[in-house]
Image (cartoon, helix red, strand yellow):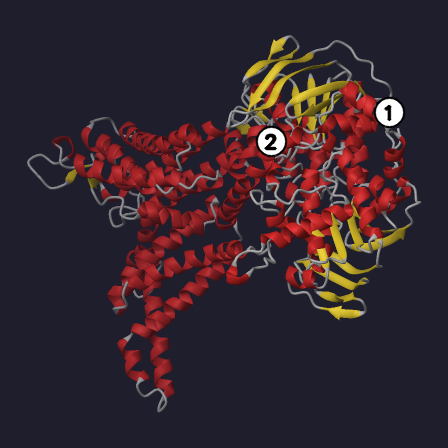
């Protein structure tokens, strides 16, 4: 404050310092949140278009790397039909192989073999869907839980430990192992929420760091006697006991297990939580406008903790389901890339339970089908990675581009500027 | 210089902000552009200043069509603009700010600060601005900063000066001084475009008044038109401006703030030893220029700001330091000053926003399950009761107009039994028609026997609603006066003059000021 302002003769008021300083940061924070909201809750049409566009570009890549097509390309002007024919057959072969590998193998000798690809896709999709639901809860509440990978690992480690160490009656053993996984994931993510609420530490950084801690913690545990098989120094745990295993759904021929039902239940639960419960109301309010939530008496900091715990509980459940249903033993690589793929699936599914369910199946289908494609046509599975990445890129790009160029997002928002 | 806008059309997506607007500004004329928030005034001026490109239509300067690709083109054509939010570098001196953007250099590339100083002094003397070219801008009062903006435009030889809501940040005294400056500029041959929604000021200074509503010119008026006529043109229907409220019947003083101090993040006292009380059935208005601690005071009462010292007593219970949740639960209704930031979750539905602080209580929740039917029924009731113009309870609040958004906030806060009602800037950015409605609802709450606190920077609103007025200046309450206190006394108090002194000053020079601004008691 300066002396000049106190001069009553000049009629000088005190300038408004505080609000002026706060506004820019609030605006940029709002913009970032806006982008996050756009990415996570946009329209279904964009998703479909992004997928189609990614498949087209993937097709072009398949053509580009196919040796037969390259041969015909050398005499493309002499006989263009050869080139286009070869290009078409290489793409259609690759994509039909992918379909046969992921959904329905119509060339299979038996009905069971024909249906196996679909059940395989469902099996792979199970942990993806559950973990993505967890990530989505964070998204809807404005928190970016990048730590799904670590939470999946911790869920698998604790759920697995209960599964292969304790000896309990059926049902109860399974239930406890699952609860163990849920708690482990919840606590692991809760740490990030607590640090954010207490110190303002950004959840992205904390959860990424927690990923590393979880990774090396599990690697260490796998060197201890309580986590390894007797007489073995392999970093692999004993098998999950029969009573703690998720039952198979379609008999011994298929890997599909009851975890898929757990995924469906989890999706229903998240739908109920976000749209029909007071917790979800608070999560969404805090995620959308923390200032208004605070003014309305909601405890914003404690919401951060709660959101992260719920988010981590779901991703932890994904880890438990993966070990109790699919892997049946703990290894350092049990989480694969589930935690990171879950982020993609949550984006792809627009953070909505139903969307995530189908996005998870799609994503898993691409992986499973990609392997089949590689086996059948020799097309590299990396094409699948490119397609998956492109889908996300196209979905994420429009709002990002709008944000970068500061284009109006919708007319309602420009109204203030034209006032 | 004569400036003409012909058929200017500008749309943002489906929203047509300007629809074939024609406007002629003659030389040496004050042309007032009157319209509500969102009517399209600022868009039009941004088109004129080259910040937006019009979709169609043309700008004609002295009968020559021009094409402005950016503010630089507009400046070269002699059009200057004083923005609502000043475009000054706070740490630069007045002279440095004035030369910014057209820096003259001496031999060797050195800045020619001396010529800028000379220019400032020259213009300042000519119009009696009293500017020191070497004063640092951030040390200057807001009104003086505005003069720096004007000098900046004049230094670039602006023939047409656009003033965008210039009085929004000024005290009443500064407003009077600005109006005097506008008269001098006009006398010197400068044309002025004066954008505002304040009828009183328009009448005081304008030669021609053009009224814009929903992006269209809906008419022009003479400055002799009554405020009621102007308001009706602006809104598009008849509005009654006066609020005939019955005199207050104050009851028991149930809300007491005693020696309250709130510190800013840097440790300065933003609310400094403030004491006042509010009786049941009474409206106390906290008046003051924006940024004098009113916001912090209201937020401290709600528990959003930590209390450094003092007590806040509601029904003989100290609520200082309680969390917002507990304060709301104790029966405080709170309307924050910025509804879009603190009042509403814009991508929530109307129904959800109407229960934003009650969502976890019966009847809207059973355990942790929401009762969507109860929430919807509540919404239907409030929409009806508060005349909220919406497509339905499920519509997103962000799609409503400012006035209807504010109704949602008020409807929510008034929908439960209250022991104290605090409203900050209850009608900021709200159309004239809704202002009337909101004011009546606030008075109705008072008549129900609730103590009411209104925080407002609009003197009109303060005088209209208050039973008593507490004027805040630099975190302190400089005086608590009856609502019959003359405006110019209030204005002086808002500038930091104690009540007695203000009364003496105002009675010493009453007549000219009232004449200039058309202010009456």
Residue on which the image places disc 1: B507
Specify the farthest residue to the left. Answer: A231
Q: Nearer the viewer, residue B415 or A267?
A: B415
How far across and how far down the image is residue A66, in percent?
A: 29, 74
Q: Which residue is at 48% across, 59% downward?
A: A48
Q: At which x and y percent is residue B174? A: 75, 37
- How packed mark 2 is, by other alpha carbons closer than 10 Å (few <14, some 14-19, many 20 or more), is few
Q: Secondary structure at mark 2?
A: loop
Decide if residue A417 is in sight here.
Answer: yes
The picture quadrant where one finds residue B391 is: top right
Q: Chain of mark 2?
A: A
Above or below, comparing residue B14 to residue A238 in the picture: below
| Chain ID at mark 1 | B
Instruction: Specify the label residue A173 is tagged with.
Output: none
Up-down relation of residue A260 to residue A296 (above or below): below
The secondary structure type at the circle numbered 1 is helix
Q: Is residue A209 above or below residue B221?
A: above
Q: In this image, B309 relative to A316: left or right?
A: right
In the rendering, at what x and y percent does residue B451 appear? Answer: 73, 17
Left or right of residue A368: residue A268: right
Q: How many marks?
A: 2
User: Which residue, given by chain and number where applicable, does mark 2 sit on?
Assistant: A2
Q: Quadrant of residue A68?
A: bottom left
Tell me whether the residue at label 2 lies in contact with that at label 1, contact meaning CB atoms closer than 8 angstroms.
no
Q: Is residue A50 above or below residue B404?
A: below
Question: In which quadrant will I find the N terminus of chain B?
Answer: bottom right
Expressed as whole percent of the image width and height from the top left, the position of residue B100 reads: 60, 53
């Amino acid at each position: 404050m300066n002396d000049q302002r106190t001069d009553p003769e000049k009629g000088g008021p005190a300038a408004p310092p505080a609000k002026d300083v706060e506004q820019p940061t609030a605006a940029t924070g709002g913009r970032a949140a806006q982008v996050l909201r756009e990415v996570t809750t946009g329209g279904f049409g964009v998703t479909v278009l992004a997928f189609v566009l990614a498949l087209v570009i993937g097709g072009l890549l398949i053509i580009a790397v196919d040796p037969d097509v390259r041969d015909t390309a050398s005499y493309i002007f002499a006989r263009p039909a050869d080139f286009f024919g070869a290009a078409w057959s290489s793409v259609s072969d690759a994509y039909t192989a992918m379909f046969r590998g992921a959904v329905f193998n119509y060339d299979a000798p038996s009905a069971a073999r024909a249906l196996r690809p679909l059940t395989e896709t469902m099996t792979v999709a199970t942990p993806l869907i559950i973990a993505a639901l967890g990530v989505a809860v964070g998204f809807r509440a404005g928190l970016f839980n990048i730590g799904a990978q670590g939470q999946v690992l911790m869920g698998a480690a604790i759920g697995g430990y209960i599964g292969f160490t304790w000896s309990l009656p059926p049902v109860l053993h399974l239930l406890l192992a699952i609860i163990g996984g849920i708690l482990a994931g919840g606590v692991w993510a809760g740490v990030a929420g607590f640090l954010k609420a207490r110190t303002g530490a950004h959840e992205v950084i904390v959860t990424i760091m927690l990923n590393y801690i979880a990774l090396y913690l599990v690697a260490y545990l796998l060197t201890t006697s309580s986590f390894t098989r007797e007489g073995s120094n392999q970093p692999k745990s004993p098998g999950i006991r029969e009573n703690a295993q998720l039952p198979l759904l379609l008999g011994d021929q298929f890997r599909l297990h009851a975890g898929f039902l757990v995924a469906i239940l989890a999706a229903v639960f998240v739908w109920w939580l976000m749209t029909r419960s007071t917790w979800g109301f608070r999560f969404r309010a805090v995620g959308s406008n923390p200032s208004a939530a605070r003014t309305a008496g909601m405890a914003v900091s404690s919401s951060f903790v709660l959101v992260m715990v719920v988010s981590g509980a779901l991703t932890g459940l994904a880890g438990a389901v993966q070990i109790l249903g699919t892997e049946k033993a703990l290894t350092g690589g049990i989480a694969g890339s589930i935690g990171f793929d879950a982020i993609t699936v949550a984006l792809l599914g627009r953070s909505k339970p139903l969307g995530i369910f189908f996005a998870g199946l799609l994503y898993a289908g691409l992986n499973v089908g990609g392997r089949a494609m590689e086996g059948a046509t020799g097309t590299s599975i990396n094409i699948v990675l490119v397609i998956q990445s492109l889908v996300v890129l196209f979905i994420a790009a429009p709002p990002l581009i709008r944000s970068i160029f500061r284009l109006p997002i919708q007319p309602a928002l420009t109204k203030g500027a034209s006032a | 210089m004569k400036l003409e806008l012909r058929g200017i059309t500008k749309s943002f997506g489906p929203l047509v902000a300007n629809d074939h607007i024609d406007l002629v500004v003659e030389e040496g004329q004050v042309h007032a552009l009157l319209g509500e928030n969102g009517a399209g005034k600022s868009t039009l001026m941004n088109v004129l200043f080259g910040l937006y490109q019009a979709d169609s239509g043309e700008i004609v300067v002295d009968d020559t069509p021009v094409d402005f690709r950016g503010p630089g083109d507009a400046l070269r054509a002699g059009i200057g603009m004083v923005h609502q939010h000043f475009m000054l570098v706070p740490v630069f001196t007045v002279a440095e700010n004035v030369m910014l953007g057209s820096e003259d250099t001496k031999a060797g590339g050195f800045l020619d600060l001396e010529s800028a100083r000379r220019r400032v002094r020259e213009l300042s003397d000519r119009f009696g601005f009293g500017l020191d070219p070497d004063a640092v801008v951030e040390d200057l009062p807001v009104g003086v900063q505005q003069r720096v903006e004007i000098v900046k435009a004049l230094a670039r030889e602006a023939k047409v000066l656009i003033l965008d809501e210039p009085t929004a940040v000024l005290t009443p005294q500064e407003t009077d001084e600005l109006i005097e400056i506008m008269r001098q500029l006009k006398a010197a041959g400068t044309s002025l475009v004066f954008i505002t929604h304040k009828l009183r000021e328009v009448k005081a200074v304008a030669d021609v008044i053009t009224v814009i509503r929903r992006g269209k010119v809906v008419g022009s008026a003479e400055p002799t038109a009554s405020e009621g006529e102007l308001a009706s043109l602006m809104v598009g229907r008849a509005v009654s401006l006066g609020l005939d409220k019955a005199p207050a019947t104050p009851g028991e003083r149930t809300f007491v703030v005693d020696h309250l101090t709130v510190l800013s993040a840097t440790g300065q006292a933003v609310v400094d030893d403030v004491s006042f009380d509010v009786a049941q059935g009474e409206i106390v208005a906290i008046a003051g220029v924006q940024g004098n601690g009113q916001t912090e005071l209201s937020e401290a009462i709600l528990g959003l700001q930590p209390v450094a010292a003092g007590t806040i007593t509601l029904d003989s219970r100290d609520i200082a330091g309680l969390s917002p949740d507990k304060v709301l639960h104790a029966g405080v209704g709170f309307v924050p000053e910025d509804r879009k930031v603190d009042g509403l979750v814009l991508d929530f539905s109307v129904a959800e926003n109407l229960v934003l602080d009650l969502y976890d209580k019966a009847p809207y929740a059973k355990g942790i399950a929401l009762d969507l039917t109860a929430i919807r029924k509540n919404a239907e009731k409030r929409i009806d009761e508060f005349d909220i113009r919406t497509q339905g309870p499920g519509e997103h609040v962000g799609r409503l107009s400012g006035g209807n958004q504010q109704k949602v906030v008020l409807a929510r806060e008034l929908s439960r039994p209250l022991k104290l009602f605090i409203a900050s800037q209850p009608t900021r950015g709200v159309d004239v028609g809704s202002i009337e409605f909101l004011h009546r609802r606030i008075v109705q709450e008072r008549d129900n026997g609730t103590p009411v606190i209104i925080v407002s920077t609009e003197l009109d609103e303060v005088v209209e609603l208050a039973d008593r007025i507490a004027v805040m200046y630099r975190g302190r309450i400089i005086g608590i006066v009856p609502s019959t206190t003359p405006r110019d006394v209030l204005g002086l108090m808002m500038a930091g003059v104690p009540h007695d002194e203000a009364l003496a000053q105002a009675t010493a020079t009453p007549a000219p000021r009232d004449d200039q601004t058309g202010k009456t008691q």
